[in-house]
Structure formats: structure tokens, C-alpha cells
Amino acid sequence: MDSFVYNANPGRVVFGSGTLKQLPEEVSRLKLTAPLLLSTPQQVNQAEQLKEILNGKIAGIFTEATMHTPTDITEKALQYAKDTKADAVVSIGGGSTIGLGKAISIRTGLPHICIPTTYAGSEMTPILGETADGVKKTRSDPKILPGTVIYDVDLTMTLPAAMSATSGVNAIAHAVEALYARNTNPIINLLALEGTKALASSLPEIVENPSSPSARSQALYGAWLCGTCLGSVGMSIHHKLCHTLGGSFNLPHAETHTAVLPHAISYNAPRIPEAMKKLAEALPESNGDAIHGLNVLLSKLKVKRGLKDFGMKEEDIDKAADIAVSNPYWNPREIEREPIRELIRRVWAGEPAK
Ligand code: NAD
């Protein structure tokens, strides 16, 4: 076995169905008395539910969490936290709300309890992306990692089937890139394969029956493991491309990950035979071919495969290729403009990966 470094992130995880009820216990465990609850406008009801569970003992509710964590919203929330003398933040929602919780926590030192309701995995990472003046910047700091995460399967029941599918593939993408990360290790490989298996087997069932408790439970478990992968090792071409495409052409996060993933893997395939073999084993009906396995999964999930369906224009393909090659980063295969342009063209057109 090659030598490696394994860095465990020190988070506490409470997992199950109905675990939301354990929030008061988690709050008192940290000796907190006035948490500020955070949500998007779409999830106000869930924030209200938290208030009830905490018997109204909160600093307040801030419901303006927004995609890409704009700093003007963070400033507004910070002022509200100060005015209400909050001694913690509790974020309930997807990556957008958790991003706001991280942004407040890193600026104030307030403890952050996360209650994730999608499969994006932000709760398991020390990473924060923030947008100021239309530019998104990402940083990593161990202090960004939320201290406590409560996974309550019941909260994911309302995540619509289509969003569950793309959010779940977003999670699988973290695991896939972890398999061939430069700083990967055997422990992260175990988590990546277990997370991929759990999601690949449960997502098609969720699309057919979004209220299946067993499928929802498996998917959230898989999302946790995949999020851990994202928080532990470096990501490569897939994540960089999605960041470029999402940020430059205002494309939706999880849908972009879903459309790009098979193509990004196909680009790297010649350089990562071992990872391709393991991935194929984790994907049902792959017949030993990971790309085929992913294509089968995506067709079962009935997701859109072309970025043109999300408003990306044909002339943006060249712009995207230029940005993708202008920012050098580590990837198992060298980043070359022509094959990258062809990759982006295929994703734009929605052609299946080969
Ligand atoms: P999101 O948080 O933007 O949520 C999308 C919409 O779905 C919102 O309106 C939300 O209120 C709603 N929603 C969420 N859960 C729901 C549920 N259970 N039922 C009904 N509606 C629900 O989406 P996301 O994909 O989770 O997060 C995307 C954002 O997170 C992006 O900005 C991305 O960059 C960031 N992200 C960051 C990291 C990280 O490590 N820093 C990791 C993954 C994603």
C-alpha cells in the first residue's frame, strides 16, 4: 500500500428519522441559549418548526439565504445576529443556507449547527464560496466546518424528485473525484464507494416514489459520506468545470454537476484505470464500464443532459473552454484546450458521454 495522510474532520453527526427533535439537546450540550435560525424564503416553514421544537428560545429567524452566498445578504444577517444577541447559528436547508451559516460563523466565531435538507454535502466541508460584485470566491479554513450536523431523513421527503436526482448526482460527483484525487487515501476510497453505492441504488427509487423512507434514508446516508469526501481531499476537472460554467453563465448548481459528470470522467478515464474499475463496481448495471453505468443511472433519473436546456448559448462554448484552460490546477490528465472544448460542446448539446 502507498503511504498516505488521512485528515479526519472533527464534526459531530446525528443521523436518522425524527432526529430534529434532538436539536434542544444539541443546543444545551453546547451551552447555547439564543440560536439564530437561518433558511431560504422557500423553507420558512421548516425554520418555524425549529422555533417550536426549541420552545421559542431563539434569537430570531433570518429567512433570506440565497444561492452563491452573496456578501450583502451576509452583512444583513450579521447585523441581525448582533441586534438579537445570537450566540449560535442553526442553518436548515441546502448548500445555500449552510453557506450563509458558514459565512456568519467564520466572521463571528459563533458555533454552527447544520440541518441539511438536500444531498449537496456542504455541511461536511471546511469550504465556503461567497459572491461579491458578481465574482464568486472560494476559501477553505478548518474553522468553517460546522461543529454539529443533524441529518433528519424526514426533512428530505419534501425535496422534489427532480431536485433529489440532481442533488444526489452532485454528491456522487464528490465521491468520484475523491477516488482519483492527488491526496486520496484508502479511508476516503471506502467512503466514496459506499456513498456512491448508497446513492446509485436509492435515487432511481426516489424518482419513482419520493416518499420511500428506506430510499430517502439510504440517499441521505450516501450524501453524508460523499460530502465527507469533498471536505477531505482535493477535487479536479469536474468540480473546476462546474464552478466555471455555473459562475460564468449563471447555470444551476446541481443540474450542471449532473450534466458534466459522465463527460469529465470520460476525459480522465485513460489516466485513472483503477478508479474506473472501482466506480464500475459501485454502479448497478455498469457491466464493468463506469461511463455506461452512469449513463444508465442518469437515464433512469430522467434528468436533463444538455446545458443548452438551462440557457447556455452555443457561443459560450469557446468562452468556457478559454476560462477552463486559463486557470491551471492539478488533474490526472493534462488540461488541453481542444479536447476540453469538445467535452464542453458535448455537455452543451446533451450528447451522452462515450
Ligand atoms: P439550495 O440550497 O440552493 O436549495 C435549492 C432550493 O431547494 C432552495 O429554494 C431551497 O430552499 C429548496 N430546498 C432545499 N431543501 C429542500 C427540501 N427538503 N424540500 C423542499 N425544498 C428544499 O441547493 P443545494 O444544491 O443544496 O446548494 C447549492 C449551493 O450550495 C451552491 O451555491 C453551491 O455552490 C453550494 N455548495 C457548497 C458546498 C461547499 O462545500 N461549500 C458544497 C456543495 C454545494
Image: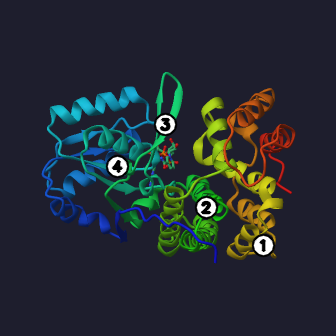
| Residue hosting label 4 | 143
Residue at screen point 36% across, 39% down: 103
Q: Earlier in the sequence, mark 4 or mark 3?
A: 3
Q: Amino acid at mark 4?
A: Lys
Q: Amino acid at mark 3?
A: His
Query: Disc 4 and disc 3: Cα gap in Å?
Result: 19 Å
Q: Vertical placement of 155 versus 110: above or below?
A: below
Within-10-Å neighbours for mark 1: few <14, some 14–19, many 20+: some
- At numbered mark 3, what does the secondary structure look like: helix, strand or loop? loop
Q: Amino acid at mark 1?
A: Ser
- Say if disc 4 is inside 8 Å of ligand 1: no
Closer to us: mark 1 or mark 4?
4
- At numbered mark 2, what does the secondary structure look like: helix, strand or loop? helix
The reply to whether discs 2 and 1 touch (Cβ–Cβ < 8 Å) is no
Q: Earlier in the sequence, mark 1 or mark 4?
A: 4
Within-10-Å neighbours for mark 4: few <14, some 14–19, many 20+: some
Query: Disc 2 and disc 1: Cα gap in Å?
Result: 20 Å
Q: Vertical placement of 226 versus 349: above or below?
A: below
Using residue 130 as the reference point, say whether residue 268 is left or right of it.
right
Residue at screen point 72% across, 76% down: 281
Query: Disc 2 and disc 3: Cα gap in Å?
Result: 23 Å
